[in-house]
């Protein structure tokens, strides 16, 4: 009994710490928090904003990677510069994870062909398109107004968008 009397204040303090710690844990879970890798505490709303920023950064990185370098295509029988430009635009859309409408594809391929001077191709001829030029043409096509897109839409039914046979 003497030992209990002697350490009574220590037992009371220990119980108080446990009770206070439990209260803090219970109250701390009311506003759900998420801990990131760098140990910063974020609310759910901050986490959503952070996730959106991360996705946007990843998309920008993909776009940067997709718009660096060149693509080289070989003309086959029946190919034109426009067809190879279309292939490049579609490849850019896939690589940069961009949703490009068919009217925008037609506009972008036309911008590229016009910029190149609408060259005639020979079978077996190699055509190299700079990815940054393709990215610029797509960006220009995506900036078109709805009236301008409607004008490009007129050509869509006459275009073969299957460029799998082009290399």
Image (cartoon, grey):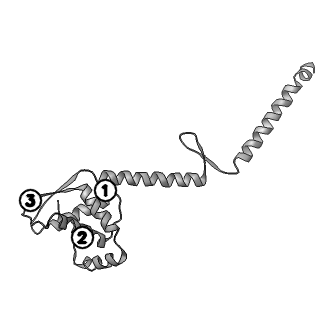
Which residue is depicted at the point 24% across and 78% down? 155
Q: Which residue is mark 2?
A: 161
Work out how far the residue at label 2 is from the one at label 1, CA to CA, in angstroms.
17 Å
Q: Label 3: how many residues lie within 10 Å, few (<14), some (14-19) or many (20+)?
A: few
Which residue is depicted at the point 9% across and 67% down? 120
Q: Which residue is mark 3?
A: 125
Q: Which residue is mark 1?
A: 95
Element under disc 1: helix
Work out how far the residue at label 1 is from the one at label 3, CA to CA, in angstroms.
24 Å
Q: Dividing the image into 4 quarters, which one contains the C terminus?
A: bottom left
> Label 2 near label 3: C-beta < 8 Å?
no
Could you tell whether 41 is left or right of 96 in the image?
right
Element under disc 3: loop
Q: Quadrant of residue 77?
A: bottom left
Number of callouts in the render? Answer: 3
Q: Earlier in the sequence, mark 3 or mark 2?
A: 3
Q: Quadrant of residue 118?
A: bottom left
């Amino acid at each position: 009994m003497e030992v209990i009397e002697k350490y009574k204040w220590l037992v009371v303090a220990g119980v108080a710490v446990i009770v206070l710690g439990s209260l803090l844990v219970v109250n701390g879970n009311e506003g759900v928090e998420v801990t990131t890798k760098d140990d910063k505490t974020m609310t759910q709303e901050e986490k959503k904003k952070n996730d959106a920023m991360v996705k946007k950064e990843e998309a920008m990185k993909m776009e940067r990677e997709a718009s660096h370098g060149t693509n080289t295509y070989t003309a086959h029988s029946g190919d034109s510069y426009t067809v190879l430009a279309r292939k490049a635009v579609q490849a850019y859309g896939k690589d940069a994870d961009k949703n490009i409408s068919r009217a925008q594809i037609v506009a972008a391929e036309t911008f590229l062909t016009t910029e190149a001077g609408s060259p005639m191709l020979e079978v077996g001829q190699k055509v190299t398109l700079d990815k940054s030029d393709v990215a610029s043409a797509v960006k220009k096509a995506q900036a078109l107004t709805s009236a301008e897109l409607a004008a490009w839409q007129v050509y869509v039914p006459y275009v073969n968008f299957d460029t799998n046979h082009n290399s």
